[in-house]
Image (spheres, grey):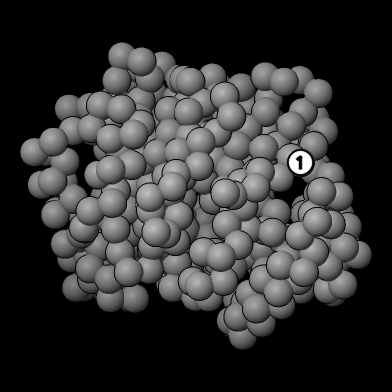
Amino acid sequence: MYETLHVEYDESGASDWAPLRAHADAAHDLISRFSEWVRSEKSWARVCTFAHDSPNAWKEAIEVSKITADEPDHVLAANIFYDTARLRCGCTAFAVDDEKGPLHAHCLDWEIEAEILMRNITFFKFENARKDRDFFSVGWPGFLGVLNGVAPGRFAVTLNAVWSDEILGRGEPLAYVIRKALATLSTFDEAVAFFAQVPLSCDCLLLVTGAHQGELVVVERTSNRYAVRRPDAGLLLLTNHYCVIRSGFSAPAYVETGHEPSGRGSRERYCKSMEQLSRRLPRTVESCLSVLAESPFLQSSTIWRSALRASSGQFLVAPPPFNSPWHSPV
């Protein structure tokens, strides 16, 4: 039902986007729409300048622009949507420790152009000459980074939006940072250390799970600070507020109340989700996906729900209408 796009990449993480030719029209439409949104944000030029400093990001933007007939800067702009407009993103995620390796579940909530995103969901298998470095992600034609992905036998990572009062940092766009980690790092510990220390352009919450029992953390980030949150009784839950780092907003700050700038009630969603998980902890990838089909995990802005296990590489993604999940071919 949903096509898997096979993308080859080299040891530096640079990817060959020639397979995108079969999806050039859809990619052009998405790039046009999202670059327009991003270029209306005050911060886009600053983030785009930093993205230019990333050799792979700029090189690939040029390559894709020749396929889609877009300006390279527009390709780049469409790929820094989270960094410049994360107030329009949401997400709820959780991880459950297990002797077979942690279970990892995530709902992607996105308020802009939801219909075209749902219509163009595409699955990516990033392939390397070293087959032990292959990894999977889900996204859209023309989206060159990764918001959630799994590297079988190594680790998995998903992104939740969050906000602090810090200015944008001098780092690569976040979706490229996540892709680089999946392409170049070998272990859960390497991934956690990388996400804690790598220069970032903006705030984020990253749920990272590994292939072995006990390997699950949330890395809370601003552009300049980090905290690593570990599980309580084998469970980690995150919505859209910091639990360790302070946001820096004046009281009543959403980091304490959950009333973030976009008004989605992160703290209330966190409490309701925790109450539900406390009654019934899922113990399989499939049951994680079922939990995500219910409120408060599932939102009107949910684009897809995904569940995975890094140890096996099992990766299920269910776009609307949520009844035909895609399975990673592992």
Residue with the mark numbered 1: 7
Q: Quadrant of the C terminus?
A: top right
Q: How many marks?
A: 1
Question: Which residue is nearer to you in this view: 83 or 69?
Answer: 69
Residue at the spot 77% in from the left edge and 69% down from the top edge: 25
Vertically, is 330 above or below 53? above
The residue shown at (60%, 80%) is: 37
Q: Is residue 280 visible?
A: yes
Residue in the picture at 17% in, 27% down: 233
Question: Mark 1 falls on what kind of element?
Answer: strand
Name which residue type carries label 1: Val
Q: Is residue 205 at least partly visible in the picture?
A: no
Q: Quadrant of residue 91?
A: bottom left
Callout 1 environment at 10 Å: few (<14), some (14 to 19), or many (20+)? some
Q: Quadrant of residue 257?
A: bottom left
Task: Say whether residue 321 is left or right of residue 273.
Answer: right
State the image coordinates of residue 299 (x, y, percent, origin top left). 30, 64
Q: Looking at the image, which residue is at 23% across and 32% down?
A: 282
Q: Residue furthest right?
A: 66
Q: Horizontally, is 91 left or right of 13 in the view?
A: left
Residue 88 lies, in percent from the top left, at 44, 72
Q: Is residue 176 above or below residue 229?
A: below
Is residue 249 or residue 215 the one in the foreground?
Answer: 215
Location of residue 109 with respect to 9 vertically, above or below: below
Q: Quadrant of residue 265?
A: bottom left
